[in-house]
Image: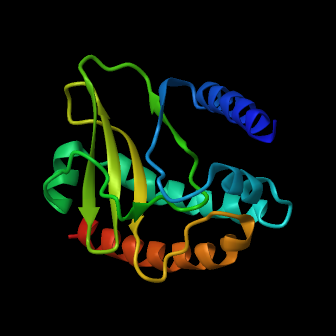
Amino acid sequence: MKHRTLLIALTFASLFLGLACEAASVTGIPMPFDDRAAKLSVWTNSITAKQIEADRQQYDTIEEQLRKLPESRLKALFGAPQDDVPKEYAVPVHHRELVCLPGYYPGKMRSYFLPISNFGGILVYTSGDGDFIASVTLYLKTDSGFTALRSSADYPARHTWDLQHTEVVRKHIQKVISK
């Protein structure tokens, strides 16, 4: 019963998210390490919810900065795209499971992964035939200090890990973009 209620809640949240961002389409992103129920618990906890929202705003800034670049420049900066997200990459705890893709653009929607240094990477969604990026999702490369979120008890260690690795990736992105 608990899982059914969670599934219903996530379905309605997905629909609401699509309406809220006025998306032409909403798509799920790979999140292999974390338990959905644990994430929802951390997101809705009165103690951690404010931190989650602050983290989302920081990531939104980084992702939006990358999304505004022409696709050709993004590839020139970070190298050859890969078809799939490598298995050792994780999405930060605060990140939603869905991505809103804006508007309609003629042509096929594509996605690919670009590694960024040895610490992270981005899942890129393009839409249309132009030099346009519809969405970017920042991933962090796992290492021996990584803690998967399997219960809310894992959150403090994972949050610390996310922040440390995000800062390294953010600095690298700023260095590369400023050239």
Residue 18 shown left or right of residue 30 in the figure? right
Query: What's the residue at 82%, 59% (across, down)?
Result: 45
Answer above or below: position of 132 versus 151: above
Residue 109 found in image quarter: top left
Which percent across, then down, holds residue 144?
43, 82
Quadrant containing the N terminus is: top right
Answer above or below: position of 105 versus 155: above
Residue 71 shown left or right of residue 7 in the figure? left
- Residue 68 visible here: no
Viewer-nearest residue: 118 or 144: 144
Residue 148 shown left or right of residue 50 in the figure? left
Which percent across, then down, holds residue 54?
67, 63
Query: What's the residue at 54%, 78% (across, down)?
Result: 161
Viewer-nearest residue: 157 or 99: 157
Answer above or below: position of 7 versus 76: above
Viewer-nearest residue: 4 or 143: 4
Which percent across, then down, holds residue 12?
71, 28
Number of labels in the image equals 0
Residue 47 found in image quarter: bottom right
Query: What's the residue at 47%, 54% (across, down)?
Result: 32
Answer above or below: position of 73 versus 1: below
Query: What's the residue at 25%, 55% (across, down)?
Result: 114
Q: How is the image coloured?
A: rainbow
Which percent across, then down, holds residue 48?
77, 65
Residue 139 found in image quarter: bottom left
- Residue 159 visible here: yes
Q: Pick out the residue farthest to the right.
A: 46
Quadrant containing the C terminus is: bottom left
